[in-house]
Image: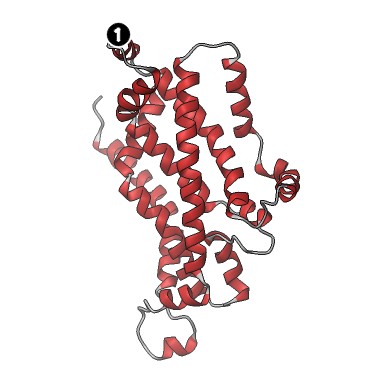
Amino acid sequence: MKVSPIERGANYLVLVGFALVVLGPIGVIVTMAFGPKDASAAREGGAFHPENFPEAWEIGRFGQYMLTSVVVATIVVVVSVLASILAGYALGTMRFRGATLVFYIFLLGIMVPTEAFIVPLYFDLRVLGLTNTVWGVALPQIAMSIAFGTYWMRTYFRTSSLALIEAARLDGASSMRILWQVLVPIGRPAILTLVLLVFMWTWNEFLIPLVMSPNGAVRTAPLGLAFFQGQYTQGTALLAAGAVMVALPVVLLYVFLQRHFIKGMIEGAVRE
């Protein structure tokens, strides 16, 4: 299709406008993070203050909170992605009684909001002695991630090449060997996209760590950032520096997996 210069220019104008709307607030936060933290720092001179980051890191105890977030995110991503691959493989390639009902039960995990079950879940985990523990924060997020992950991986396995699966079976491959040596390697974009999405949701989760750890023993990075303002500082520069540090792991992981993420999203969009 031939596009006129005027139409091409209008497209670029719209794209630049949306880019400014999205990147504008991020640019403001980064600028504030490197700005002077108070009037005395501004009088001493210099508009660039990278010392805000180590100061915010120490005052806000972000080292402890980031370590907690890394532990929780690692547990959630590893367990939920492995379980989602297995559940998606069973529901996407095998025919057994009750498969549709099991799939709809998994979908309930996507449809029900966290606010609807967080209070009874807290009392259940408190009876089991799991509140104020890493598992008390990780297990609810594993369950929520498996619900979406199963839906995601089921879609991928249902659109996989049946001829390839049949050829592997004719060669004597077992179901698990077909999964791990045939379907998983060629499904790397879909799996890495799931890894990125689960990591991002787990890292940014606020409500579950807040409720499941009332004494603050398992305080994650976003939760620590919320308490950082008011409890440790009133300055916007240190708060912005803390926000940049908390968001940085997700940005770095996205940049590292960007190629696979875009490919996985495009494949998901064009498939059934």
Residue at 36 percent across and 31 percent down: it is 266
- Residue 11, by quadrant, is top left
> Where does residue 139 sit, x and y in percent of width and height?
59, 44
> Depth check: 135 or 227 in front?
135
Is residue 74 among what the camera can see? yes
Residue type (three-letter) at the residue carrying disc 1: Leu
| Residue pictured at 51% horizontal, 29% vertical | 150
**x%, y% of residue 123?**
76, 48
What is the quadrant of the N terminus in the image? top left
Which sits in the foreground, 151 or 75?
75
Q: Is residue 39 above or below residue 55?
A: below
Dot 1 crowding, Cα within 10 Å, few <14, some 14–19, many 20+? few
Q: Is residue 27 above or below residue 268?
A: below
- For the point 62% across and 33% down, the residue is 109
Name the quarter where the C terminus is drawn.
top left
Q: Is residue 186 left or right of residue 116?
A: left
Observer-nearest residue: 13 or 66? 66
Horizontal side of 120 relative to 54 (left or right) equals right
What is the secondary structure assignment of the residue under circle 1?
Answer: helix
Q: Percent from the top left, x then y, of residue 108?
A: 64, 29
Q: How is the image coloured?
A: secondary structure
Residue receiving disc 1: 170
Along the horizontal axis of the image, is 161 left or right of 108?
Answer: left
Residue 105's spot in the image, x, y percent?
Answer: 63, 25
The one of 88 and 233 positioned closer to us in this rendering:
88
Q: Is residue 135 above or below residue 53?
A: above
